[in-house]
Amino acid sequence: MNEQSPFPRSYYAPAGGLPAQSELMTGRAVFTEAYAVIPKGVMSDIVTSFLPNWSETRAWIIARPLSGFAETFSQYIMEVSPGGGS
């Protein structure tokens, strides 16, 4: 995707792949009652999810309910390849 978008990218998009075994991973997530900060260095292929009934699609789950049925939201970063989807 080398086309210039008229809209500047405002969120980190994982590039995929795995870090080299020699790479020092020092990023740590920070969780509070109100928010979480997830460093971009931990968003590699090893933490992707494949969703049921979705083809050619990977998801990085960045927020999910932690307890109880009242918390029914989740947030994802999705990578859908051409021809993929639900």
Image (spheres, helix red, strand yellow):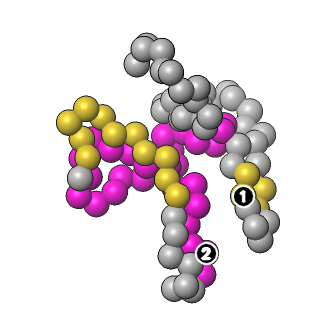
Q: Position of residue 82 (x, y in %)?
A: 25, 32
Task: Indicate the secondary structure of the residue bearing disc 2.
Answer: loop
**Camera-side residue: 48 or 86?**
86
Q: Position of residue 54 (x, y in %)?
A: 26, 52
Q: Report if residue 74 is visible in the image.
A: yes
State the residue in front, 52 or 83.
83
In percent of the image, x 48 and y 21: which residue is there?
5
Circle 2 is placed at which residue position?
66
Q: Position of residue 23 (x, y in %)?
A: 69, 29
| Residue 48 counted in the magenta span | yes
Which residue corresponds to mark 1? Answer: 36
Bounds of the magenta segment: 40-67
Q: Is residue 84 left or right of residue 10?
A: left
Does residue 74 lie above or below 3 as drawn?
below
| Mark 2 neighbour density, 10 Å: few (under 14) some (14–19) many (20 or more) | few
Q: Residue furthest left?
A: 83
Apparent side of residue 25 relative to residue 80 in the rendered image (left or right): right
Residue 15, relative to residue 61: is it above or below? above
Rendering coords of residue 20 (x, y %): 60, 27
